[in-house]
Image (cartoon, rainbow, N blue to C red):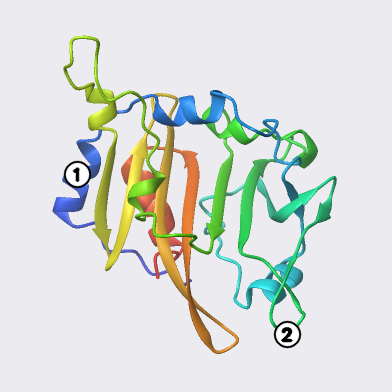
Amino acid sequence: MSGEAQPSLPHGVLQALEALVAGDGITEAWLGGGRHPDSLSYPWAPVSEVRLRLVTGFPVPRLSPRAVAGRCEVLAVPGRDGEPFFDVDERGRPSTSVFAVFYLPQDLDWRHAAASSVLREEVTHLYAHLPMGDRPWPQSVAQRLDRFNADGSPRPSVTDDFTVVEVDGTSVGVQVDRSGAACLGWSIHRSCGGAGQVWNVTMMTRGSAVEVVHMVREAGLLQ
């Protein structure tokens, strides 16, 4: 990406992002338990940039060096104990329908990094996957708690912590959390083997809604 300054976000987008009220949805989703241990090394395996590009067919989407200065980048695909699990395409070549890009502090070893570390450390997770089914995107990136209080009134932290904005022609779902984490969701269009593909992207990082949207826009990841 060039070093040209990015134009500011439209006023309506800024208003929508600044109006968000941080809730507990992201924290509950990451700390509420799941089928897998809270460890990045459990469901993922590191791969090289060359290998990841070969199996996806396009360059790895990356944040700008300025946004992740001082952090280590780890590219990964589904796997276990450092061994990647690949699919096989119609030509018998290895492929993948999901991959991840992690940015970790220098002193946080990949093997010891937790998926929930984004809630309390300078860790960024970026996931991309080919859509399955007809789930609405990016609306489905929102993590929701019980929408109502005991008296039946809506919980503000649930109803106001998520929005969808239009940035440079791309719909971006944005959710903010009291932990300081934010979650973004959007789609990217890429060509693989001459065919067009749509990948759904989710990014978790720390920062305000405005800061995080600027981060992905600056890296050119919305195109």
Could you classify mark 1 by the number of other residues whose Cα lies within 10 Å: few (under 14), some (14-19), or many (20 or more)? some
Residue 187 on image: x %, y %: 41, 63
In the rendered image, which residue does mark 1 sit on? 16
Q: Earlier in the sequence, mark 1 or mark 2?
A: 1
For residue 74, side relative to residue 3 (left or right): right
For residue 27, side relative to residue 140 (left or right): right
Answer whether residue 40 is visible to the viewer in this image. yes
- Going by the numbered disc 1, the residue's amino acid type is Ala
Q: Nearer the viewer, residue 203 or 62?
A: 203
Secondary structure type for disc 1: helix
Secondary structure type for disc 2: loop
Residue 56 on image: x %, y %: 64, 72
Q: Residue at x 19, y 36 (%)?
A: 19
Q: Residue at x 56, y 44 (%)?
A: 124
In the rendered image, which residue does mark 2 sit on? 91
Q: Is residue 54 above or below residue 149?
A: below
Residue 69 on image: x %, y %: 59, 49
Q: Residue at x 56, y 61 (%)?
A: 62
Instruction: Quote the CA–CA distance across marks 1 and 2.
Output: 46 Å
Q: Nearer the viewer, residue 89 or 42?
A: 89
Answer whether residue 8 is visible to the viewer in this image. no
- Going by the numbered disc 2, the residue's amino acid type is Arg
Q: Residue at x 39, y 65 (%)?
A: 222
